[in-house]
Image: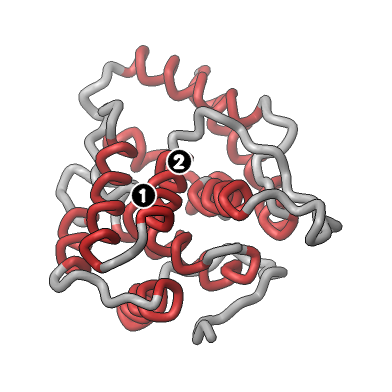
Amino acid sequence: MYRVISNAMNTSFPNPLGDDALASTWHTAWSTGLGLLPPQGLFAELMTAWSEPHRSYHDPRHLRECLALWRCWWGLSRSPGELAIALWFHDAVYVPGAADNELQSAAWAARSMTRAGADSESAQRVHDLIMATRHDVPVAPVSARATAESAPPAEATDSRLMLDIDLAILGSPPARFEGYDRDVRQEYAAVSGRLYRARRSAVLRGFLARPRIYGHPPAFVLLEAQARINLTGAVSRLAQ
């Protein structure tokens, strides 16, 4: 049994996990979720990576917020342990503007799982969940009325949930979203203002153009309306 809080109808954006809850999530993902022990020293290696000085948004707070949502929504997942491991690694390698951040993070996760004794299929699923956070392939929403016969494969369901959690910041309260927006700009401080505004606006408009930003009903209810308000405001500011 997962000894975490599960509330699929959570109605507020969660606070980042504290140190004890973060450590508990790590051990729960490996021991309960996968039936494995993590490689020695891996937790510290990951926290060091997430804490690199060039990170302003893709930092421990983002990790802690993602895992707070995992604690709320793990019951929506077909494989909660794999989903948690994927979240732990999804921005483990992060260099602003690099094209292979997700690939390097996914490879690290798969290697770590193999070292711990995970089978190749499980390691591949985690690899694929991390690669999904490239956000280059929008996913269809999950129906709240799906039956066991009509439900999509586990990999598709968890990919949707992975994306919802990673993009939850877009639907965060206005003050948090504005802080996120400033932090992303700080990570790209080397990019000229004109070029940054053009590229950033294109990314945000892309999310606004989607029929739905969030695939799972609880994520849609919690985040969709606020995300569209936040994104519209950000695009307007970039145009000024």
Instruction: Name the side, left or right, on which 53 lies relative to 59.
Output: left
Left or right, 142 with respect to 61, comes to right
Contact between marks 1 and 2 (CB within 8 A): the answer is yes
At 36% from the left edge and 37% from the top edge, which residue is drawn? Answer: 184
Which quadrant holds the N terminus?
bottom right
Disc 1: CA contacts within 10 A as few (<14), some (14-19) or many (>=20): many
Q: Position of residue 153 (x, y in %)?
A: 65, 50
Q: Point out residue 23 in the picture as x, y percentages from the top left corner.
A: 31, 78
Q: Indicate the secondary structure of the residue bearing disc 1.
A: loop
Residue 202 visible, this angle: yes
- Badge 2 local density, few (<14 within 10 Å), some, or many (20+)? many
x and y, in percent, of residue 17 in the image: 41, 72
Q: Secondary structure at mark 2?
A: loop
Q: Residue at x 26, y 33 (%)?
A: 96
Q: Nearer the viewer, residue 48 or 115?
A: 115
Residue corresponding to mark 2: 133
- Residue, x 44% and y 62% (percent of image)? 82
Q: Amino acid at mark 2?
A: Thr
Q: Find residue 116 and report its horizontal and vertical position in percent.
A: 25, 68
Residue at mark 1 to residue at mark 2: CA–CA distance: 7 Å
Q: Which mark is residue 90?
A: 1
